[in-house]
Every structure is written in C-alpha cells, then in structure tokens.
Image (cartoon, helix red, strand yellow):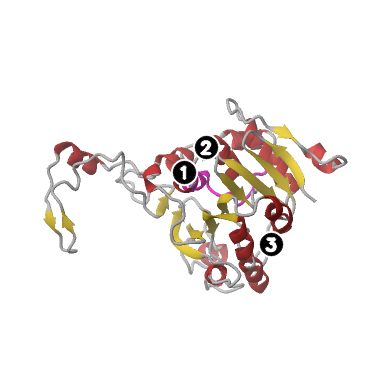
Amino acid sequence: MKRELYRTKFGKLLIGDSIDLCKSYLLRHYKNRFNLIITSPPFPLNNKKRYGNLQGENYYKWFVDLAPIFSELLTDDGSLVIEIGNAWETGRPVQSLLHLECLFGLVKNPEADLRLIQEFICYNPSRLPSPAQWVTVNRLRTVDSYTHVWWIAKNDFPKADNSKVLRPYSKRMEQLIETKKFNAGKRPSEHEISISAFAKDNGGSIAHNLFELENIDNNRDIRLPHNVLSFSNTTSNDYYFKRCRQENITPHPARMHGGLINFFTEFLTDENDLILDPFAGSNTTGYCAEKLKRKWISIEANENYACDSIIRFEEPGFDSKLKIVITEGDESVRAKA
C-alpha cells in the first residue's frame, strides 16, 4: 500500500519499502517517466546500521536486482546516479571488492540495458578515520576519505549539458582570457593549441569528475561548480542541522551531499523534469529538486527519518507549500509528523 507522508509544490515523499513501491506503484504510474534517479543506497557495511544495510551475497543480489526496475522507470535519455562507499572484509585489513562486483552486476544484468557513462570521485577529508580498527587502533591503513559516484544510463547519449555546471576559472586562466597572450602550438603531449584557444570567455571551465569538498592543496582555491560549492559552504550550519540540534534530533548518518545532488540535477535535467530518490533518508534530494524547480518523488522506509525530513521544507523563506498527507488511521506517523 502506498503511504504518502507529505507533498510540496513539486514533489512528494512516500513511506515504505522502496523496491515494493517501485515494482507496484511507480511502475504502474511512472514507467519510463523519470529523467533522473539519484540516490545513495545503504552501503554494504560490516556493522549493522539503524538505516538498514545488507551484507555479502544478500547485498549483491539485492543491488543487482535493482537494474531492471530502474531501467523501466527511466526515460530513454534518463540517467541513474549512485553514490556508494568502500567496504572492507570482516575482521581483515583488506578492502572488499563487493561494491565493484555490484557495479559490474548492475550494468551487466541481462534484464536491463545499462552502461557506465562515467565515474566520479567525491573526496571529503572531514570523514572520520575508517575503518577504525585498521586506521586508528592498529594504524595499518590510511583513512578511507572518498566515495564513488557512478553515472549510468540506458544508452550512450543520455541528456546532459556540462555548460550548466561550469567551474570558476583559475586566476591564471582569467589572465589569459583578458590578455589573450599565451604560447600557441604543439605541446609535448602532441596536442595542438590554436591561437584562439583561450581567447573566449565561456563563463567558466568544464567541471572535473573529482568533487573536492575541502581543499586538497591549501595554496589554491577550490574550484567546484557554483552549485556544489554553495551547498558545501553552508551544510554544517544550515536550517536542517540547526533544527535538529534544537530539537535533539539525530540527523540521518549517511546523507548524500546536497552539492552532488545539485550538480547532477542541473547537469542532467531541466526544470520540471522528474527525479526519483528511492532511498531518501532525510530527503536532501527532494529539498534540492524543490529549490531547482524539478518534480520529484522520494521513498524512505524509516518513519523517523521520513518525518524528520519535513524540517527541510520548513526553512524560512522557502515557499515549498508543504502539506502533510497521512493515511487515515496511521496514528504512529501522524504523531511523529
């Protein structure tokens, strides 16, 4: 049964098992309609978390079985973006290959015609040292400080426009554009640089597939696309976190970074396109989609996290027109919301 917790001007959040809801409600009403599915599914961690996570072969089967479901929900030129972290072998200082096996299994699933378009890396030096046993206790390994972001699609040419997610120019590049003085000609790499190569101001440089959420090198500025950087600068002190602290609410422990969601939303969709996050957590995806005027549907299995996500849409000045919609008789959710 579909249980809708709330809806806004552009979207709605459903409570329930995402696989069940995708197979029933979404495939019945939204088949081939999502322009973007973006999510951070439960990671294959060795320790059980409150938000739920499978392990080993169970995780692999669960993950690979997502392929035909997502494929049927996507438009022909739609994209699937998945953020996933590394896993480690139980009791061993050895990195697991499970996340890579899951990627291969997903894109090679014979019931879905998917392919990996590009891999991105999200580097975050503020992550706590992990795996703790091998990093801080025995000191045998370095800190696992990045996650993988896989951009997957049903064909080789999904809708995308990198001119909408440009990075700021470096100071050196700004000087080249202004002076139009640089050394043209062939480089050692055998690339031929034309006289007019740096003469035009395109509004910024093409984004890289590395998201540096904090400086790798303190001697230079971070040059993330504006829509990623603006979110990075406010995440730790935004309205959602302030309210969580005020009301003694523990935020969802595995949130997808809003800057990543902003980036792929603007890169791969247009206004009024439809976005799905089947593992919504605190519903950062819905919040970002609402801000960017995209239609959205989010699904979250945990009632507490789903109800806590309402806070995001109560941000002052954010006219989301949020309306609580609870199934009659669902008193447990009614009380939390």
The reply to whether residue 45 is visible in this rendering is no
What percent of the width, then of the height, locates residue 44? 61, 65
Callout 1: SS = helix
Residue 176 marker? none
Residue 101 counted in the magenta span? no
Distance between the alpha carbons at the discs numbered 2 and 3: 34 Å
Q: Which residue is mark 2?
A: 292
Instruction: Kindly identify the residue that appears in the image at 19 percent across and 60 percent down.
Output: 191
Callout 2: SS = loop
What percent of the width, then of the height, locates residue 178? 18, 36
Q: Which residue is mark 3?
A: 48
Which residues make up the magenta segment?
250-265
Residue 253 counted in the magenta span? yes
Mark 2 or mark 1, which has the lower sequence index?
1
Q: Which residue is mark 1?
A: 266
Displayed quadrant of residue 17: bottom right
